[in-house]
Image (cartoon, coloured by chain):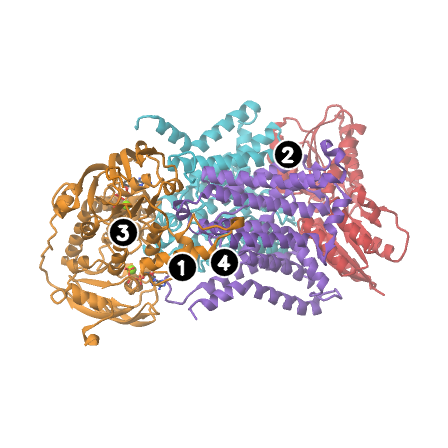
């Protein structure tokens, strides 16, 4: 093994999009057998850099060097041929096809006459799935899997080829802790085989747990590389955002108001059963559970997107039936949905129009939309949430993932809801913005909003909630106040073990 | 049993159930309404049905592939006509004068090559420009039709070669020549789509094009090949049909794209790509042909046929949707 | 002003490509035939494009909302036949509202199927293309429909008269275009049409009643079709059952030429009007130059693909598709 | 014993002529107790027409009447009927010559003669006006590819130079048997040519479309001559706006076809080309004809 030769190297990469200089002279290298973290705020250019490496974007300037030889990556196929495997930030799967076909997409084993060699395909796939310790098999249809399992299928692709380098772009965003452990094992295996790994994540604890070195990008510029063992969170954060971050919980004390939302015995088919809880004004309730526990479906039901099969919903003490999001909005409920691209945004529309979409009927000057008021609203929330965009005319589809998420949050905050439901509000959001959003959530509660936070990140739930609902398989297992909750009893609850039952 | 298995089975079998319903209905109604002494389900009548399904059916197999690919080809009718012109006209070209009846395979080859080229042109434009296939082929549907007219003005192009006619009218083991072509094409495309890498990639490309690109499938050439197959099959359909009829009007094949798409959709191929089956398309073709034939058999006139076929198409779409609904707790979007 | 660097000029050319092509064509035709730019000819072209144009306005709404309408041709035949038939039975002042009501019913039916039942619009309107044609034939018994007293009826104003020197069809087209243009660009409804077409799920999550918006788009479309039928009927005071046959594709071509995306979410009324005029002038120019009608097919083919190509090339900043 | 006669028509409902034809045919068949009919319509589609021929053969009808969608493409299908021993009668628009040997008789108008007659009507009128030396005309032909359209245009174009050698035919464009399309074509002609003395249209439907265009443009004095006198054409002649046409009754057409079939089946001798007469009609002699019902 030649120690000194990097598995791959990027030199002076420049990439501009209309109106945005996404990468500005970035250089960066990965050694064989190294786990190299790439960090930076939302929109710093991490995904763009990796897309350049993966042959999806052509750089305007700069070189890619593999094995000390400069190469031109013209297509993903080319990148793959050079041994670069790319596990994407957004799921990139064909839902109608089987797990095996997805894992080997683009390189299905062949027999004569171009026939698929099904036997080999399933054997190889099952071998990989076994390593990943997942509960589905090679023939399962990908569309039938949970999001987390789909993510595992995505990860499985890293194991199909003799990779020189593997890029993981936020692979853990929708994984449970158990699955994360598997992922980290996989990464350790690859590392042991001398594969260079680039790992992108906003989660500090992961970064410090598995990486060897950390490179930081800010506003498209390279800020430096540090050895993980020789640095700490503060230093990284400072490199990323150029200042120190105060992560302590805002201790705003405030009065609890009336019960804003009360739910009694709510059920919806097989998704969840017999859910009862209440939220007061001024209170933040955290819903925690494994992916698939049914939290999103509760939110969707409260927002009128699903018809409950049983149970009652009370708003301000009044029993209410909510048949559509329009109903829900009229009654003061807002939902920041889980899937920002699919559910939260119209990507081909500009920032302003996205932000004011739910209230476009109310922002009227005569029969017309009052564009002035719209711009005012946009400006207000851009400043408040620190949304990075050249202006309101920018199409939302051209923003980075994190900034897109902030547009969605701004859209629902500007409705001044009495009940605000946020589903995975900080998925894919950088640390700086994340703490801003957490503060914002606390702040909203302080101003008398009732807030429900659904999250798969335990620190987040622990950090923002006044009390926590632990769910397992469509049922509430236990509720905790912030005083009684610990990591241990929370994990027990969401795994289906309650103290009563365990006893 | 997993939930949804029943509805999946229903969906898969739906087109065949529909065909059986049609057969029963027309046989019974035909007894009272038809002037014909022969039963609808008469063997000869069914064999004729297969034969008459061939022109639309052969093209429908190609359309199934492009639709699984999440593309569409609206130019098949014009390709059909242009290939037919090449087929018939090339037999009269002085260069081939010495060939005698050997001109036939040459003319066939030229016609099929025409289809390939026209399909390749569609595919190339879709690939290189990134313009949606609907728009590209809407354009070439006009453009190819323009070429048809350029060829011979508004006159029909004709050449009767009785050897060719006799071959096309022949039957072998009781099946007509066009029927053999239809069956062979169906089998070949079925093999392609279910057994080969190209076929499986076609599903992946239609299901999630970006994923396919990311996985390193060369999506552009892949789609182009499928357009070429479709062009080829449109030409093959013309070869089979015009070998027998010997004359093509410049507006022949107009609206074929609509019939073909109708058959493919009846067969359950999703217009949104990624799903579909060649065998079900075959069912869709038969169902349409049965419907047309049956309606005429019971004495319905043109206007009724139009009305009924239009409404049936919508009804099938509606039923398909009902079968897909999981329950009232489904997400309302 | 942005500096005029190379990319900017390229971007400008691509964005305005369709207008530039239009201007080049106009210049070419003018040189080839000095009558082309005559006032009479221009008025004539716009007047005869008005029917197609009015239909294209409605289809623009449908396309922006992410759907298709292939039934407008059949539906226009239906409106024309119905209003001509009722003209002699009820008199024009009742025949017109009755025809509008019947056409709107067809639009509502399609809107219900596509909007509320969420059926695929391509297939639904394909089905309706055939079904409405059948309906028209049944209604008319397959016969041509003619107004008995062609000289005496005031019904001819919509197709044949002028107001202050402007032919009424042009006036109706212009007014409807202005009105619908404002509705689409400036009102909450217009905004919702774009949202529903851009991402229907996100629109629903934003409290927009998507079914209602789609339904309304088909109502608009059928209203425009009825208006087109009215102009058509009034213009010739008699008609065949197939008068609108094939128009659905011409209408779609005009809308696409104007730059509306079939994926939904983009397009404007102004651009559609440009698309309609381009088709009209090309058709007319080629006839004047003495080319056979089929030359127009080929020219339309090339123009459609170039227009859409340049449009998306400008958006992605690259001429060729990045797909390998 | 009843005779079972099948008919496959071209495209019913596309215009009134064909619709009236079908009704007249059914009526005539109903009136004859010895006749039973199977009435089919190809909807303008050759493939469907060939399929219908096969169906009729399979149903073993006694005779087949065909109104060809394409005069050549149906020849092999006609041969099939011939081989099956079923006599075939072609109606309205003849099939091409290579098919003659498989056909018992053609019954219908003589479209070439119609074209010639239209040329004569036009020429006579120009002579009466004294402009036969300098008149300029345009032609609007029927749907491209249809035998009737082709034959009428051919008859007109061949005959015109014989009777009026100095009249120039400036341009021909198809109007697809469609009034609206024809109106558009005429609009362009009017812009392009300052001087148009006459218009020959392949039928009156298109002729009236052209007339509408001329009226809208305020161009008077153009001589319109059509074919297949429709009610709209007849009315326009009554108003003095339209000069002449060819009188052709779909009822005669249908009845002649059925009668030919019956005669063939009863063993009578029928001429191979069994034309029914289609006389000239102009403003001068129109009183001799009743107004067309279609
Ligand atoms: N296709 C595009 N067109 C225009 N701008 C783009 C495009 N893709 C990315 N950008 C811009 O490039 C910048 C970098 O985006 P990138 O997705 O690389 O950020 P990131 O570091 O991955 O952020 P996140 O952590 O949110 O995923 C952003 O400003 C983004 O808006
Ligand atoms: N076994 C499964 N088969 C099919 N779909 C599943 C399965 N499990 C979960 N899903 C789907 O995966 C998605 C995630 O599940 P769900 O939304 O219920 O989880 P959640 O508790 O909200 O978790 P999270 O919000 O973290 O995703 C849902 O759309 C659900 O329908
Ligand atoms: Mg990213
Ligand atoms: Mg969820």
Residue bearing mark 1: A138
**Left or right: where D85 falls relative to D226:** right
What distance separates the C-alpha of mark 1 from that of mark 2?
55 Å
Which shade of the palette goes to chain D? red
Residue under the image location 31 percent in, 67 percent down: A321
What distance separates the C-alpha of mark 4 from that of mark 3?
57 Å
Regarding mark 3 in the picture, which secondary structure is present there?
Answer: helix
Q: The chain shown in purple is which?
A: B
Whether tag 2 and tag 3 are in contact, CB under 8 A, the answer is no
Q: Is residue B101 visible?
A: yes
**Left or right: where A280 falls relative to A397:** left
**Left or right: where B79 falls relative to A88:** right
Q: Is residue C93 visible?
A: no
Camera-side residue: C46 or A239?
Answer: A239
What distance separates the C-alpha of mark 4 from that of mark 1?
45 Å
Residue D245 is situated, as x and y percent measured from the top left of the image, at 75, 40
Whether tag 4 and tag 3 are in contact, CB under 8 A, the answer is no
Residue under the image location 79 percent in, 36 percent down: D117
Residue bearing mark 2: B150
Mark 3 surroundings: few (<14), some (14-19) or many (≥20) residues within 10 A: many
**Mark nearer the viewer, 2 or 4:** 2
Location of the N terminus of chain A (image quadrant): top left
Residue bearing mark 3: A187
Q: The chain shown in orange is which?
A: A
**Mark nearer the viewer, 1 or 2:** 1
Camera-side residue: B324 or D5?
Answer: B324
């Amino acid at each position: 093994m030649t120690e000194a030769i990097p598995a791959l190297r990027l030199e002076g990469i420049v990439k501009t999009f209309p109106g945005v200089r996404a990468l500005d002279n970035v250089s960066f290298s990965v050694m064989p057998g190294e786990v190299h973290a790439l960090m930076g705020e939302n929109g710093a250019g991490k995904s763009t850099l990796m897309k350049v490496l993966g042959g999806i974007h052509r750089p305007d300037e700069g070189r890619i060097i593999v094995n000390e030889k400069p190469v031109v990556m013209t297509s993903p196929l080319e990148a793959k041929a050079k041994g670069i495997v790319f596990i994407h930030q957004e799921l990139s799967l064909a839902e109608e096809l089987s797990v095996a076909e997805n894992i080997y997409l683009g390189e299905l084993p062949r027999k004569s006459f171009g026939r698929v060699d099904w036997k080999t395909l399933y054997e190889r796939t099952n071998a990989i799935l076994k390593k990943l310790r997942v509960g589905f098999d090679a023939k399962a249809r990908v569309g039938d899997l949970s999001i987390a399992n789909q993510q595992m299928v995505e990860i499985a692709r890293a194991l199909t080829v003799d990779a020189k380098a593997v890029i993981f772009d936020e692979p853990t965003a929708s994984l449970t802790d158990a699955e994360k452990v598997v992922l980290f094992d996989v990464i350790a295996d690859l590392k042991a085989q001398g594969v260079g790994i680039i790992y992108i994540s906003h989660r500090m604890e992961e970064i410090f747990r598995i990486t060897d070195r950390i490179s930081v990008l800010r506003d498209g510029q390279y800020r430096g590389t540090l050895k993980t063992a020789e640095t700490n969170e503060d230093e990284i954060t400072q490199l990323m955002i150029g200042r120190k971050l105060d992560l302590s919980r805002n201790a705003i004390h405030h009065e609890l108001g009336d019960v804003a939302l009360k739910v009694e015995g709510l059920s919806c088919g097989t998704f969840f059963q017999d859910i009862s809880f209440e939220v007061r004004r001024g209170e933040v309730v955290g819903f925690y559970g494994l992916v698939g526990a049914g939290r999103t479906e509760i939110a969707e039901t409260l927002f009128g997107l699903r018809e409950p099969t049983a149970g009652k919903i009370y708003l301000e003490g009044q029993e209410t039936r909510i048949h559509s999001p329009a109903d829900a909005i009229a009654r003061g409920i807002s939902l920041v949905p889980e899937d920002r691209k699919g559910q939260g945004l119209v990507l081909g529309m500009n920032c302003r129009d996205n932000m004011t979409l739910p209230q476009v009927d109310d922002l009227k000057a005569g029969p017309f939309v009052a564009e002035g008021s719209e711009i005012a609203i946009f400006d207000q929330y851009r400043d408040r949430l620190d949304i990075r965009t050249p202006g309101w005319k920018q199409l939302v589809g051209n923003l980075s993932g994190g900034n897109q998420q902030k547009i969605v949050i701004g859209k629902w905050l500007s409705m001044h809801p009495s009940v605000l439901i946020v589903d995975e509000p900080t998925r894919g959001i950088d640390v700086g913005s994340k703490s801003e959003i957490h503060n914002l959530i606390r702040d909203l509660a302080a101003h008398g909003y009732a807030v429900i936070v659904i999250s798969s990140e335990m620190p987040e739930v622990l950090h923002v909630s006044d009390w926590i609902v632990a769910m397992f398989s469509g049922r509430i297992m236990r509720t905790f106040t912030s005083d009684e909750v610990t990591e241990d009893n929370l994990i027990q609850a969401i795994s289906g073990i309650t103290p009563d039952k365990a006893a | 049993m997993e939930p949804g298995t029943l509805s999946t089975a229903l969906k898969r079998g739906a087109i065949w159930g529909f065909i059986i319903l049609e057969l029963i209905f027309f046989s019974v109604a035909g007894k009272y309404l038809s002037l014909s002494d022969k039963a609808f389900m008469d063997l000869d009548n069914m064999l004729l049905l297969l034969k008459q399904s061939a022109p639309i059916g052969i093209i429908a197999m190609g359309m199934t592939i492009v639709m699984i690919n999440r593309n569409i080809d609206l130019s098949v009718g014009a390709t059909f006509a242009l290939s037919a012109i090449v087929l018939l006209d090339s037999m009269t070209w002085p260069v081939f004068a010495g060939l005698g009846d050997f001109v036939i395979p040459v003319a066939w080859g030229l016609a099929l090559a025409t289809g390939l080229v026209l399909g390749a042109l569609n595919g190339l434009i879709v690939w290189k420009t990134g313009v949606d296939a609907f728009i590209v082929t809407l354009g070439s549907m006009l453009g190819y039709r323009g070429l048809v007219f350029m060829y011979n003005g508004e006159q029909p192009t004709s050449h009767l070669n009785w050897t060719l006619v006799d071959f096309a009218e022949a039957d072998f083991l009781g099946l007509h020549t066009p029927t053999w072509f239809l069956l062979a094409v169906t089998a070949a495309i079925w093999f392609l789509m279910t057994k080969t890498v190209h076929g499986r990639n076609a599903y992946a490309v239609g299901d999630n094009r970006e994923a396919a690109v990311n996985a390193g499938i060369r999506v552009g050439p892949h789609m182009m090949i499928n357009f070429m197959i479709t062009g080829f099959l449109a030409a093959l359909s013309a070869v089979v049909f015009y070998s027998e009829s010997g004359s093509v009007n410049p507006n022949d094949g107009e609206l074929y794209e609509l019939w073909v798409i109708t058959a493919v959709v009846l067969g359950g191929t999703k217009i949104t790509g990624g799903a579909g089956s060649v065998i079900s398309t075959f069912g869709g073709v038969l169902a349409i042909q049965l419907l047309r034939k049956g309606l005429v058999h019971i004495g319905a006139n043109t206007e009724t046929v139009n009305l009924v076929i239009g409404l049936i198409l919508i009804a099938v779409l509606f039923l398909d949707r009902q079968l897909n609904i999981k329950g009232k707790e489904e997400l309302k979007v | 002003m942005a500096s005029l660097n190379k990319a900017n000029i390229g971007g400008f050319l691509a964005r305005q490509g369709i207008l530039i092509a239009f201007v080049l064509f106009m210049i070419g035709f003018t040189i080839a035939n000095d009558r082309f730019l005559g006032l009479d000819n221009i008025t004539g072209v716009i007047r005869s494009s008005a029917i197609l144009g009015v239909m294209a306005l409605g289809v623009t709404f449908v396309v922006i909302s992410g759907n298709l309408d292939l039934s407008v041709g059949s539906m226009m035949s239906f409106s024309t036949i119905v209003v001509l038939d009722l003209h002699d039975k009820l008199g024009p002042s009742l025949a017109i509202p009755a025809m509008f009501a019947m056409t709107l019913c067809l639009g509502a039916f399609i809107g219900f199927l596509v909007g509320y039942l969420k059926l695929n619009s391509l297939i639904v309107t394909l089905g309706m293309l055939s079904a409405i044609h059948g309906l028209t034939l049944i209604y008319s018994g397959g016969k041509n429909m003619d107004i008995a007293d062609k000289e005496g009826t005031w019904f001819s104003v919509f197709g044949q008269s002028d107001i202050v020197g402007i032919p009424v069809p042009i006036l109706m087209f212009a007014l409807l275009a202005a009105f619908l243009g404002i509705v689409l660009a400036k009102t909450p409804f217009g905004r919702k049409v774009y949202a529903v077409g851009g991402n229907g799920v996100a629109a629903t999550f934003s409290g927009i009643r998507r079914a209602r918006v789609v339904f309304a788009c088909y109502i608009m479309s059928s209203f425009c079709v009825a208006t087109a039928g009215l102009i058509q009927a009034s213009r010739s005071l008699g008609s065949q059952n197939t008068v609108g046959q094939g128009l659905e594709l011409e209408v779609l071509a005009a809308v696409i030429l104007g730059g509306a995306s079939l994926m939904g979410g983009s397009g404007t009324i102004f651009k559609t009007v440009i698309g309609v005029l381009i088709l009209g002038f090309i058709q007319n120019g080629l006839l004047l130059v003495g080319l056979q009608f089929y030359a127009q097919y080929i020219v339309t083919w090339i123009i459609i693909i170039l227009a859409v190509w340049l449009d998306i090339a400008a958006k992605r900043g690259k001429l060729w598709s990045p797909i390998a | 014993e009843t005779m079972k006669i099948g008919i496959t028509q071209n495209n019913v409902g596309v215009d009134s002529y064909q619709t009236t034809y079908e009704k007249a045919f059914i009526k005539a068949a109903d009136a004859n107790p010895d006749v039973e009919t199977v009435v089919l319509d190809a909807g303008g589609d050759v493939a469907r027409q060939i399929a219908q021929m096969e169906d009729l053969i399979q149903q073993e009808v006694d005779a087949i009447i065909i109104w060809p969608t394409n005069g050549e493409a149906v020849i092999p299908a006609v041969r099939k009927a011939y081989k099956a021993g079923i006599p075939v009668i072609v109606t309205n628009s003849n099939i091409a010559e290579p098919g003659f040997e498989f056909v018992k008789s053609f019954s219908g108008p003589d479209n070439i003669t119609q074209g010639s007659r239209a040329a004569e009507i036009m020429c006579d009128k120009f002579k009466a006006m004294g402009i036969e030396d300098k008149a300029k005309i345009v032609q609007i032909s029927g749907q491209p590819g249809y035998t009737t359209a082709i034959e009428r245009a051919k008859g007109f174009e061949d005959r015109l130079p014989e009777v009026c050698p100095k009249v120039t035919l400036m341009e021909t464009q198809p109007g697809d048997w469609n009034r609206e399309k024809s109106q558009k074509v005429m609009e362009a002609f009017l812009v392009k040519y300052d001087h148009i003395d006459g218009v020959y249209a392949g039928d009156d439907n298109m002729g009236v479309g052209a007339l509408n265009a001329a009226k809208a443009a305020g161009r008077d004095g153009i001589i319109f001559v059509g074919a297949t006198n429709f009610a709209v054409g007849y009315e326009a002649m009554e108003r003095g706006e339209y000069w002449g046409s060819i009188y052709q009754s779909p009822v005669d057409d249908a009845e002649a076809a059925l009668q030919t079939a019956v005669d063939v089946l009863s063993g009578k001798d029928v001429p191979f080309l069994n034309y029914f007469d289609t006389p000239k009609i102009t403003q001068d002699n129109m009183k001799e004809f009743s107004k067309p019902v279609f």
